[in-house]
Amino acid sequence: MPVRVTLDRLIVARGLKARDLAAEIGLSETQLSLFRSGKVKGIRFSTLARMCAVLGCRPADLLDYDADPADMIRPDDETL
């Protein structure tokens, strides 16, 4: 998938433990782990905002995108 979660880099740079970050954001460790591994299909903007507030960053610091022409191919059954 061309969208990558780069949260681990910030956690290390800030000298945090994922467990502490999860508690401060109000997520379970499991939920945060799923986000960190990219195994979630979406995230609420309010959760993203809390992450940014706690980490002192912007959403672009948590996610990265590698362009892929296949991203422009839409299956017939895909909806917004």
Image (cartoon, rainbow, N blue to C red):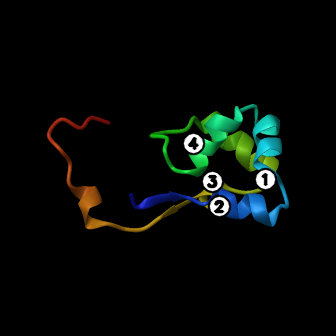
The quadrant of the image that shows the C terminus is: top left
Secondary structure under tag 3 reads helix
Q: Determine crowd level at label 3: few under 14, some 14-19, many 20+ residues with C-alpha closer than 10 A.
A: few
> What percent of the width, then of the height, locates residue 57?
74, 57
In the image, what residue type sits under mark 2?
A: Asp
Disc number lying in front (2 or 4): 4
Separation of disc 2 and disc 4 at Cα? 18 Å
**Which sits earlier in the primary sequence, circle 2 or circle 4?**
4
3D distance between C-alphas at marks 2 and 3: 5 Å
Asked whether the beta carbons under mark 1 and mark 4 sit within 8 Å of each other, the answer is no
Q: Residue 45: horizontal and vertical position, in percent?
A: 60, 38
In space, the residues marked 3 and 4 are separated at their CA atoms by 17 Å
In the image, is 33 to the left or to the right of 77? right
Please, what secondary structure does the residue beneath circle 1 have? helix
For label 4, the residue is 34
Total tally of numbered discs in the picture = 4
- Packing grade of label 1 (10 A; few <14, some 14-19, many >=20) is some
Q: Is residue 11 left or right of residue 7?
A: right
Q: Earlier in the sequence, mark 3 or mark 4?
A: 4
- Mark 2 or mark 1: which comes first in sequence? 1
Left or right: residue 42 versus residue 60 is left
Q: Earlier in the sequence, mark 1 or mark 4?
A: 4
Please report contact status of discs 3 and 1: CB closer than 8 Å, yes or no.
no
Please say if the residues under marks 2 and 1 sit with CB atoms less than 8 Å apart: yes
Q: Is residue 52 or residue 20 the one in the foreground?
A: 20
In contact (CB < 8 Å): disc 2 and disc 4: no
Q: Which mark is residue 61?
A: 2
Residue 8, compared with residue 75, is above or below; it is below
For image coordinates 73% across by 40% down, the residue present is 50
Mark 3 highlights which residue?
A: 59
